[in-house]
Amino acid sequence: MPRLLGVDIPNDKPTWISLTYIYGVGNKVSLELCRKAGVNPQAHARELHEDELARISALLDKDYVCEGQLRRQISQNVARLKDIACYRGIRHRRGLPVRGQRTRTNARTRKGPKKTVAGKKGVKDMK
């Protein structure tokens, strides 16, 4: 199993698909990497030689932000939003949707599972 930037990429898949297992590398970037490094994108990852892996790794380091560096950059951006207390930062801090989605219903991914609150006794129950 070849290893790039601390990530094991799968052997049994074509190179361009295996490269998408690296955080920050999608389909377009992986095909671009294969073209720049002179690697056959349809060849399986197990067929890559050490020099081809080294070329891909060098290109990733030089031209792209990915894996730990990208994760760090994203977390710093979110922390900056929280520090300046802008609307988006407040939404991040409260764990609510940031990009304008509704929260009355359908915000379960950000809010977590439902927390049932005991209801008030109705007027009918008092009589």
Image: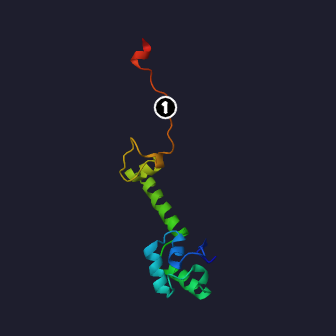
Q: Is residue 126 above or below residue 107?
A: above
**Picture quarter with the N terminus:** bottom right
Colouring method of the image: rainbow
Taking the image as shown, residue 97 lies to the left or right of residue 37, namely: left
Q: Is residue 104 above or below residue 83?
A: above
Q: Is residue 16 above or below residue 100?
A: below
Q: Nearer the viewer, residue 32 or 91?
A: 32
Q: Secondary structure at mark 1?
A: loop
Percent position of residue 29, x then y: 45, 76
Q: Nearer the viewer, residue 56 or 31?
A: 31
Instruction: Please name the amino acid that badge 1 sits on.
Output: Val
Percent position of residue 126, x then y: 43, 14
Q: Residue at x 50, y 77 (%)?
A: 16
Q: Looking at the image, can residue 109 be seen? A: yes
Q: Looking at the image, can residue 86 be seen? A: no
Residue on which disc 1 sits:
117
Label 1 Cα neighbours within 10 Å, binned few <14 / some 14-19 / many ≥20:
few
Percent position of residue 11, x then y: 60, 76
Q: Nearer the viewer, residue 66 or 126?
A: 126
Percent position of residue 37, x then y: 50, 86
Q: Residue furthest top?
A: 127
**Picture quarter with the C terminus:** top left
